[in-house]
Image (cartoon, rainbow, N blue to C red):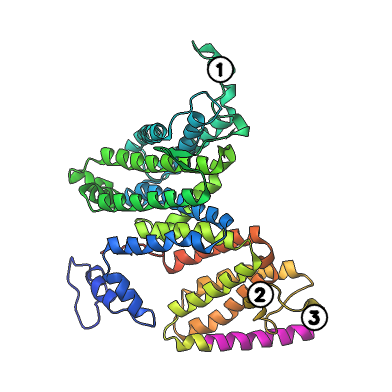
Amino acid sequence: MTSPPGGEVRIGVDQWVEQSDERREQHTGWTAPARRAFDQLTPGWRLALVATAAAAYPFFVRGSDVRIGISVLLLAMLALGLNVVVGWAGLLDLGYIAFYGFGAYFYAIVTSDHLPAHWPTEVAIPVIVVATGIVGVILSLPSRRLVGDYLAIMTLFFSQIFLELVINFQRLPFDRLPFVSEDLDLTGGSNGIPGVEDWQLFGYHINTFNRYYYLSLALVVLLIIGLHNIDKSRTGRAWRALREDTLAAEHMTTPVNTMKMLAFVVGAAIAGLTGTIFAAVQVGVFPANFELLLLITIYAAVILGGSGSLSGVVLGAVVVAYVPEVLRDPSKAGWLFYGGLAVVLILTIKPWQRVLILGGGLVGFGFLVRAVASNIWDESIAGTASGSFASRAVDGWVLILDAQADVITNYAFVAAIAGFLAVTLVKGWWRIALLIPTIYLAVLVWENKLVDQTSVTRQLLFGGALVVMMAVRPQGLLGTRRVEII
């Protein structure tokens, strides 16, 4: 452990953690007043402030964009549930989407015309949440003996078994059972179950996107409040002890197996509840809704926001769910790309005067590259950038390629990722010098390929962002830095 400036090392004391309040009060930069004011608010007032801002969202967007907000809130609910299992209890659960699918299919079966059930929402929701929790208990039983990679493999098989069951349920030999029809098909196979009914709570019909948005927002707020209280309780402390060292927690009389089971139950119940809203909003459920890509998306939200942090996983869900939708529109995507790049540079490069130097050096480097390229192969420069005003601002100093554009941009993308990783290893003016060609390569790839290929752009940007995030800030956007005393 290194000695802090002006002080000496005290054995057994984590001085980085001990001085967190002092560092928080010493925020610097133009954002310091706002950050200090936000830090002084209690968690309740912070939640109220954010919830109020979220409640105003439908008033500023088109009706179709409200559904994007619903998707964000549903992903936030899923991330909150997964955070209990992974972020707090430290259990690597790769079968989490099976709970989500179980809740969605259960709700579709009992509220659609697929079976003559038509349960009231007030009955269906509690039954589904409890039933999903029981499935969580069943999945938690192997965790008594399996940990780490072994538990991950087992839970991954569980999610794949669920997916195969919903696709091939009608092929199972149920006709051999008494009182069961031979044509029983609960899941609808690959065609899924259409015609799912809306939520109807005590006579109030939730049948519009706006109503589902506010329902989802209310549930997210209630989940945050409930999970915050659990986190501060003995159960939350037991989960964190389990995450840090299972053997030590067991020696300290923590009921390890019970805590594992409880984490699975809470996470599963939240996923099952989220599934019911998803089925109602989509007016149907289909096997393709619960494939492995969804699990990757939920984990990306938890990791990007900060595993173990309630506010972090919600922020991660907002980024992971909302940004891809913005990228569908090239004009909005340009503002997002350049605006996000500018914000990151302003927040990470100190003092801020270096940002101006970086900008000037970047433009000068661009003019130099364009001049050299025009003398070597003039036919490769196609013209000007298209898209938003933000994109047109790079005209004249960024190459807009024509010949061999795909080959050059592919190499440039790899070089840009390598450059961003290398930036994390250097400091001072060397970082500024390395950032100039790295950012130029990123802009070149954006303008020549990514801005017009939204499907590719979303995957590459998130992959690159996660790689850089893990190198620069492995605890995530709002995660707590974990310091080990050796």
- Point out the residue furthest to the right here: 379
Mark 1 and mark 3 lie on one chain; the one further toward the N terminus is 1
How many angstroms separate mark 2 from mark 1 (CA)?
58 Å
- Of residue 315 and residue 209, the one placed in the foreground of this image is 209
Question: Circle 2 sits on which residue?
Answer: 444
Judged from this view, the residue extending furthest toward the front is: 203
Q: Where is residue 339 in the image (x, y as percent from the top left)?
A: 54, 74
In the rendered structure, does residue 309 fall within the stretch colored magenta?
no
Judging from the image, what secondary structure is the residue with disc 1 in? Answer: loop
State yes or no: residue 375 in magenta.
yes
Total marks shown come to 3
State the residue at coordinates (73%, 76%). Answer: 400
Question: CB under 8 Å between callouts 1 and 3?
Answer: no
**How would you rate the neighbour count of disc 1 (Cα within 10 Å): few for under 14, some for 14-19, many for 20 or more?**
few
Front residue of this view, candidates 413 and 350: 350
For the residues labelled 1 and 3, the Cα–Cα distance comes to 68 Å
| Mark with earlier residue (2, 3) | 3
Q: Which of marks 1 and 3 is in front?
A: 1
The magenta segment is 358-378
Predominant secondary structure in magenta?
helix
Tell me which amino acid carries mark 1.
Answer: Pro
Point out residue 109 in the picture as x, y percentages from the top left corner.
51, 30
Q: Residue 126 carries which label?
A: none
Q: Does 377 appear above or below 453?
A: below
For the C terminus, give its image quadrant. Answer: bottom left
Residue 159 locus on image (x, y percent) = 49, 38
Q: In which quarter of the image is residue 139?
A: top left
Q: Do the residues labelled 2 and 1 touch (CB within 8 Å)?
A: no
Residue highlighted by disc 3: 377
Q: Is residue 264 above or below residue 304?
A: above
Which residue matches tag 1? Answer: 173
Q: How crowded is mark 3: few (under 14 residues within 10 Å), some or many (20 or more)?
A: few
